[in-house]
Image (spheres, rainbow, N blue to C red):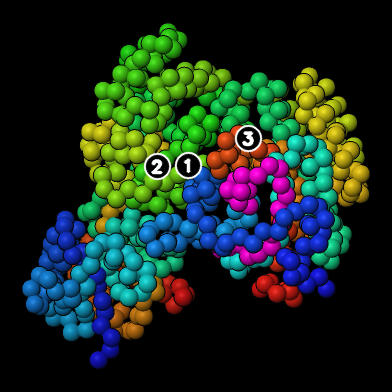
């Protein structure tokens, strides 16, 4: 018996519910031996498949490290958590849930700022006016750094945000934010507006394939069977395109 | 063979000592904040950050300039010169993440032209003492470029943008093109009453509206951008959206950025350029001439070229910038510049002029010296 194919699925919240519903719709039954506190499970009818229950950001990290083969997690977490993500992880297909945009938002009262170009200008003049750099509150350090760099913006500081990022500007903890939003209502309630070209990423949950895991033939066969069962458009093709990239990735 | 490290310091301990430098042995780990505050968050991608026992963030020094400046601030002394040698650490896509550098910083000197010239000469002497031949020196002048932007009477926002593009040709070209194209319409959708105040050019009314908005939305007063700042920039941008960079000014800027002369004739050529463009650059050109004369006393000027477009985008650099290449490669073996605004950013109570350079020992040791990879 070879090493099992490991599939990581979210262990809590909406992502968990949606993922389990998706598997059920494909006739796949996730078994959790030992009750809900067990972190490893099985897939009914698949002897060589192991299910790992992890948080969505742990799933991104484990895919990047090659310790799980397949996982359901958000593209935002893949791009934030995993360095050089495109060489480590392939996104087989978006799953139609877990939608969230990662955006740059500033106070509505900043009537003079509507684009990244405006923000660049404000950042450049900030130190002369206030004796410190412009501050951006976010949990998305890497996405923020890359996006700001792509707009040529260097003169700002990131303030680590652990809780309610959207409250940071009004509280005086930051000037602007980078955060996720689905409907924009939380931003509006906090008197923040998204910059016109400030959408960093339109993210949703994906079936992600680790390009760093060992992929012996039995694992590939099992993955193909499982993915084909899932009622998601293009997902089998996504896996097929990902698998040939594994040999060349390391 | 380059000289071996001296017990009293590094390979160039004697040379730097004769130039009046105090030798510094500085820690490898430094608080990360001063680096991020001075160079901006963007540098975080290029440095190694780690944590202390109680969560404080440190980085492995990415260069020596900020550590030397902080040492100087802590020592609280008057003008001083420092020298160092050691590893610096940078995250990069290719090549080793650590390399050996030696260098020199002159902090608090009062004579800009003399200090510029003697520092540049010391860098050239140092590189030569390490065995490099066929030296070529490129120099640029950030002070002259910012004076040019002032003399052209460009709006503040445009000056800021061009200043932070200086020395990055692709960014500069993109920004010049962007400013040259007509920029139709207002920049942002705002409530009717704001728009009314803006159309009436009523800065006071607009400021009041912004202030009321900020207060009504629970913003802590005194923690961020002020109503006056927001209203002022809104009106500025509104005026700018109806204009664009004058083609004549664009031609002057493009011509300046393309200037390249041997240092010996650069002063005269720049004066002629300013006269032809009808610009008063007398102050910065006098400094340029004094510096060029002081350099000519120390370094063979036929090895030195001035380039109008050579600069650095970071806002703490203020004047002379230079780099030195040796025979066989276009990669600089030394680079330096004047950073009169850095000490202030690091917390000096008043502005302190400063200039320094670093020598890339990894590019000079030819792989044979200790510390090279």
| Residue at the spot 55% in from the left edge and 46% down from the top edge | B39
Chain of residue at mark 1: A
Q: Which mark is drawn over residue A136?
A: 2
Chain of residue at mark 2: A
Secondary element at tag 3: loop
In three-dimensional space, the C-alpha distance between marks 1 and 3, rounded to whole angstroms, equals 22 Å
Residue that carries the numbered disc 3 in the rendered image: B351
Q: Which mark is drawn over residue B287?
A: none
Secondary element at tag 1: strand
What is the quadrant of the N terminus of chain B in the image?
bottom right
The boundaries of the magenta stretch are B68-94
Q: In which quarter of the image is residue A134?
A: top left
Is residue B74 in sight in this rendering? yes
Q: Which residue lies furthest to the bottom in this view?
A: A1
Residue that carries the numbered disc 1 in the rendered image: A156
* For the residues bearing labels 2 and 1, Cβ distance under 8 angstroms: yes
What is the quadrant of the C terminus of chain B in the image?
bottom right
> Mark 3 Cα within 10 Å, few/some/many (few <14, many 20+)?
some
- Please state the horizontal and vertical placement of residue A216, each as a whole percent of the image: 34, 84
């Amino acid at each position: 018996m070879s090493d099992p194919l490991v599939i990581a699925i979210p262990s809590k919240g909406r992502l968990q519910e949606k993922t389990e519903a998706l598997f059920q719709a494909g006739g796949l039954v996730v078994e959790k031996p030992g009750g809900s506190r067990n972190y490893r499970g099985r897939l009914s009818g698949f002897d060589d498949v192991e299910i790992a229950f992890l948080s969505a950001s742990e799933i991104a990290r484990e895919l990047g490290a090659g310790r799980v083969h397949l996982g359901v997690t958000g593209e935002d977490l893949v791009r934030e958590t995993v360095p050089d993500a495109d060489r480590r992880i392939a996104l087989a297909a978006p799953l139609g849930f877990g939608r969230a945009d990662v955006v740059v938002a500033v106070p509505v009262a900043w009537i003079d700022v509507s684009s990244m170009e405006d923000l660049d200008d404000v950042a450049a003049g900030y130190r002369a006016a206030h004796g410190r750099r412009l501050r951006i509150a976010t949990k998305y350090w890497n996405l923020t750094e890359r996006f700001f760099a792509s707009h040529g913006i260097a003169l700002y500081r990131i303030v680590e945000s652990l809780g309610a990022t959207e409250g940071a500007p009004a509280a005086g903890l930051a000037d602007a934010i980078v955060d996720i939003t689905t409907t924009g209502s939380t931003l509006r309630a906090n008197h923040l507006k998204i910059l016109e070209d400030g959408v960093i990423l339109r993210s949703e949950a994906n079936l992600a394939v680790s390009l760093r895991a060992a992929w012996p033939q039995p694992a590939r066969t099992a993955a193909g069977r499982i993915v084909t069962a899932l009622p998601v458009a293009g997902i089998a093709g996504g896996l097929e395109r990902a698998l040939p990239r594994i040999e060349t990735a390391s | 063979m380059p000289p071996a490290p001296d017990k009293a310091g590094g390979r160039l301990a004697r040379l730097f000592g004769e130039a009046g430098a105090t030798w510094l042995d500085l820690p490898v780990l430094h608080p990360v904040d001063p680096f991020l505050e001075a160079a901006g968050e963007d540098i975080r991608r290029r440095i190694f950050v780690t944590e202390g026992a109680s969560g404080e963030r440190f980085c492995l020094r990415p260069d020596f300039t900020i550590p030397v400046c902080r040492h100087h601030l802590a020592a609280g002394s008057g003008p001083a010169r420092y020298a160092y040698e050691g590893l610096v650490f940078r995250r990069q896509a290719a090549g080793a993440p650590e390399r050996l550098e030696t260098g020199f910083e002159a902090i608090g000197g009062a004579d800009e032209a003399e200090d510029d010239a003697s520092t540049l000469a010391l860098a050239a002497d140092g590189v030569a003492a390490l065995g490099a031949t066929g030296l070529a020196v490129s120099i640029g002048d950030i002070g002259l470029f910012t004076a040019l932007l002032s003399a052209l009477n460009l709006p503040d926002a445009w000056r800021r943008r061009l200043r932070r593009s200086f020395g990055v040709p692709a960014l500069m070209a993109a920004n010049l093109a962007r400013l040259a194209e007509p920029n139709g319409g207002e920049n942002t959708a705002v409530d009717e009453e704001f728009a009314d105040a803006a159309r009436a050019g009523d800065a006071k009314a607009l400021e009041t509206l912004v202030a009321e908005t900020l207060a009504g939305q629970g913003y802590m007063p005194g923690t961020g951008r002020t109503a006056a700042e927001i209203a002022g920039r809104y009106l500025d941008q509104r005026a700018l959206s109806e204009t664009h960079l004058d083609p004549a000014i664009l031609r002057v800027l493009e011509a300046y950025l393309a200037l390249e002369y041997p240092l010996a004739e650069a002063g005269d050529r720049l004066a002629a350029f300013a006269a032809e463009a009808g610009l008063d650059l007398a102050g910065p050109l006098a400094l340029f001439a004094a510096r060029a004369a002081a350099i000519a006393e120390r370094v063979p000027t036929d090895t030195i070229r001035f380039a109008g477009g050579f600069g650095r985008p970071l806002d703490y650099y203020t004047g002379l910038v230079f780099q030195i290449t040796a025979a066989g490669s276009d990669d600089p073996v030394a680079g330096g510049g004047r950073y009169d605004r850095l000490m202030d950013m690091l917390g000096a109570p008043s502005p302190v002029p400063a200039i320094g350079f670093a020598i890339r020992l990894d590019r000079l040791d030819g792989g044979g010296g200790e510390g090279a990879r």
